[in-house]
Amino acid sequence: MTDDIQVTARFERGATIIDLAGDVTTFAEEAINQAYHDASSDGAHNIIFNFREDDYINSAGIAILIGIVTEARKRDQRLLKTGLSEHFQKIFRMVGLTQYADLYPTLEEALASIEETA
Amino acid sequence: MIPPNTTRVVELKIPSELGYERVAREAAATVARRLGFTPERIDELQTAVDEACTNAIRHGSKSDARMKVVVLLSADEKKLDILVKDPGAGDLPPTEVVAPDIQAQVEGRSPTGGLGLWLIRQMVDEAYFMEDDESGGNQFRMIIYRTTDESRSAFDNESPSTDDEGGSE
């Protein structure tokens, strides 16, 4: 049994946007890490993880994201996260992920933030 | 006529294989919706059930799909009482739950992971491992009230010895 996760990447307004649709669990590890490493290889500085509001994230998924935060710090990249439901925003704050990746309610707000700091 | 305080019990058996925890969390959410849980509490319930089943699959039965994880959902008017049983074929349950040190994980000083039990404790009103049952397996119990107000009310009426409080909002 595998859970469905769709991970796609695109470049827009100075940011690499990694769109995530589905369950962010242990089954998502390879796809998410691949998308992140592809973006890094292309020289991405600003990387937005764009979730859907009905995405589900468990502790294994959070561990994947902590791993990416670790890599991003080494590469001096900025990570942003958008589209999370209130529940997962709360969990990200509880865990402390928001110290390392800024949360924005919408993709547009995340992109505007990048443009302001450019 | 069904008496007003009747407990409704749903029993699930899922294969000990990652991915099937989703079946349990969606079943729990369905039961909670019927009970009138608030959306916030349903989200918390789903996270707690998913993590408990993931632990039972990964640690309590070594992800061996020939084994089963049993999930008992006992619902009354105010709360859902959840029991997750595994065969106890893997690691022993931890004796303490510590908050994750995200900074140490990000700086590579400690491995990532180990969030599940801590997260469960943040989501539900009570969460603890019970004494071994006769089969020698692990039994993990969680209680979650329908609303945060009912949760507070239940604990206000209890004696102060609440070591297993989940600290939910």
Image (cartoon, coloured by chain):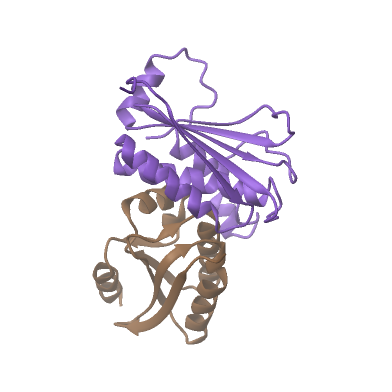
Chain colours: A brown, B purple
Q: Quadrant of residue B147?
A: top left
Apparent side of residue B5 relative to residue A58 in the rendered image (left or right) = left
Seen in the picture, residue B153 relative to A39 is either above or below; the reply is above
- Residue B100 seen by the camera: no
- Outermost residue, bottom side: A42
Tally the marks. 0
Q: Residue at x 57, y 73 (%)?
A: A30
Between A98 and A85, the one nearer to me in the picture:
A85
Q: Nearer the viewer, residue A80 or A32?
A: A32
Q: Residue at coordinates 39% horizontally, 27% vertically from top-left? A: B76
Task: State which quarter of the image contains the C terminus of chain B.
Answer: top left
Please tell me which residue lies in front, B149 or B57: B57
User: Where is residue B24 shown, x and y percent of the image?
Assistant: 50, 48
A32 to A99, vertically: above or below = below
Judge from the rendering whether residue A96 lies leftward or rightward of residue B130; answer left or right: left
> Which residue occupies the extreme front position in the image?
B1
Residue pictured at 60% horizontal, 37% vertical: B97
Residue A13: percent from the left, percent from the top?
A: 29, 82
**Residue B88, relative to residue B112: is it above or below?**
above
Name the residue rendered at 56%, 59% in the picture: B106
Q: Could you say which is closer to the camera, residue A69 or residue A76?
A: A69
> How far across and down, in percent of the image, does residue B109 sit?
65, 56
Residue A80 shows in this picture: yes
Quarter of the figure with the N terminus of chain B: top left
The x, y position of residue B74, in whole percent, is 46, 31
